[in-house]
Image (spheres, rainbow, N blue to C red):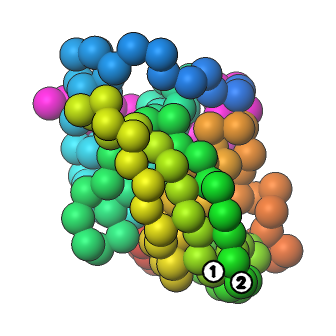
Amino acid sequence: MAKMTIRQAGDPVLREKSLPVVKIDKSIHKLLDNMAETMYAATGVGLAAPQVGESKRVIVIDAGDGLLELINPRIVASEGVQLCKQEGCLSFPGLFGEVERAFKIKLEAVNRQRQKIRLSAEGIKAQAIQHEIDHLDGILFIDRATSISKQEEEKAEE
Ligand code: CO
């Protein structure tokens, strides 16, 4: 595994719409491994492939309950509202925004074994998944934030 460079605000790749993964092969497995390593090294709770320069619909999440690898994730239902007061992003160090997100989501994705998976998530995990899927469409949390603050101290970032 290898740690990858996290693309920062202003990098055009962060604004691209990522393409679906057609073939889940060794290169996707390697990407997933490297993304997880990069996310953990940065103490983030999520990372999307465009953040490491790959316009592919791949995300990794760990909201404290283990690593979740999602290929071609798609939200199929959402319910309720949560106000995320301190949402951050590894591509925007030190920046936090207040963002409204669905409280509960149901999603479909494919795992590294090429199996179709369905899962639901709520709270912080649902927040992280919505944040990362936004990345796949070139949408950044600053686009959704109703207010943004700058902070020096380190907080959980996505
Ligand atoms: Co982010």
Residue sitting at 72 percent across and 37 percent down? Answer: 138
Residue 107 x, y percent position in the rendering: 54, 56
* Foreground pick, 147 / 59: 59
Residue sitting at 39 percent across and 32 percent down? Answer: 5
Is the stretch drawn in magenta largely helix, strand or loop? loop
Look at mark 1 in the image and give the residue it sits on.
Answer: 103
- Residue 115 seen in render: yes
Residue 20 x, y percent position in the rendering: 56, 24
Q: Amino acid at mark 2?
A: Gly
Residue 91 x, y percent position in the rendering: 55, 48
* Horizontal side of residue 40 vs 44, given as left or right: left
Residue sitting at 70 percent across and 28 percent down? Answer: 17
Q: How far, Cα to Cα, is label 2 from label 1? A: 5 Å
Magenta region, residue range: 1-15
Q: Against 54, is 105 above or below?
A: below
Tag 2: Cα neighbours inside 10 Å, few (<14), some, or many (≥20)?
few
Look at mark 2 in the image and give the residue it sits on.
Answer: 80
Q: Against 96, is 74 above or below?
A: above
Quarter holding residue 89:
bottom right
Query: Answer yes or no: do the residues labelled 2 and 1 have beta carbons within 8 Å?
Result: yes
Helix, strand, or loop for circle 1?
strand
Residue sitting at 61 percent across and 59 percent down? Answer: 130
Q: Which mark is residue 51?
A: none
Q: Amino acid at mark 1?
A: Phe
Residue 94 x, y percent position in the rendering: 56, 65
* Horizontal side of residue 140 vs 131, given as left or right: right
Q: Against 82, is 107 above or below?
A: above
Quadrant (top left, top right, bottom left, bottom right) of the N terminus? top left
